[in-house]
Amino acid sequence: MKKAILAVSFGTTYAQAERECIRPVEEALAEAWPDWQVRRAYTAHIVIRRLRERGERINTVEEALEQLKQEGFEKIVLASTHIIPGEEYDSLCRAAEGLPISEALLTSEEDLHWIAGLMGQIARREGRPVLFMGHGTDHAADETYVRLRAMLPENVYLACVEGSHRLEGILPQLEQLPGKELTLTPLMLVAGDHAHNDLAGDGDDSWKSILERRGFTVHTRLRGLGAEEAVRQRFCEKVGKIL
């Protein structure tokens, strides 16, 4: 029987982010289940369009599923690499045609306790407070970030670039940091456009610029979650539940 795992990510136009954060997740899935073929699809149509304009062919979920069926795959599951079960995850569910789909990374309370622990480990490795940038959304899943904030260990902070939990909401808290020194890093699968521009860019409205104008010493850590072995293992565990 031909079996396939379709690894579905939001996607990125940054080659380094694809290489360091998306591809390693797919490779971890292939290593965990060598008798399954691992294929790729993205849910972000704007990313797919821009990549195609550059001559890179990435399938939508619908295109990837059609291709797998034409190739005679009899068993197909979809591995989500989305962080929260928001709009992109919903679009994946609609496109899946009833096929099994693994959970987004942060779905259960157990997931939130786990990621809070990982965020604490990253802060300890940095040796200073760390502010994580989540994506945020107008979807109801935005409340995931509220639940996560309540679990964060000391020296770990979280705000989002979109949705309801913006940087300005925690600036008063950050102002109380001794020494006003911290590291910025994304709480996203990849360190792509948001990380390079909204988080660490030189523009006046980047988090780095805003904090520096307020007297902070800012360090940047442009490393997506897909580069973390613990995150790749977590995705594999979630896929294992649907095989």
Image (tube, grey):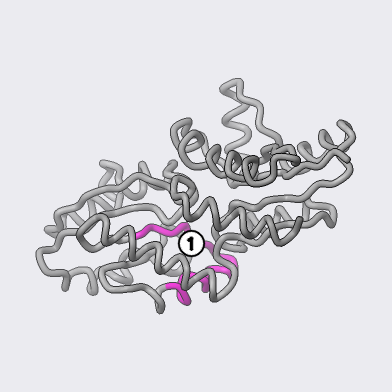
Q: Position of residue 48 (x, y in %)?
A: 62, 35
Q: Position of residue 84 (x, y in %)?
A: 56, 62
Tell me which amino acid carries mark 1.
Answer: Gly
Can residue 140 be found in the magenta stretch? yes
Give the position of the N terminus as an image quadrant. Answer: top right
Q: Is residue 72 left or right of residue 200?
A: right
Q: Position of residue 15 (x, y in %)?
A: 48, 30
| Point 28% across, 61% down: residue | 123
Q: Is residue 52 left or right of residue 3?
A: left
| Point 34% across, 53% down: residue | 185
| Point 17% across, 69% down: residue | 175
Disc 1 is placed on an element classified as loop
Q: Residues within 10 Å of mark 1 (few under 14, many from 20)?
A: many
Q: Is residue 159 left or right of residue 172?
A: right
Magenta stretch? 132-148
Q: Quadrant of residue 56?
A: top right
The residue identified by callout 1 is 136
Give the position of the C terminus as an image quadrant. Answer: bottom right
Looking at the image, is 93 positioned above or below residue 31? below
Looking at the image, is 169 positioned above or below residue 49? below
Q: Position of residue 43 (x, y in %)?
A: 65, 46
Task: Name, please, the residue furthest toward the bottom.
Answer: 150
Can residue 144 be found in the magenta stretch? yes
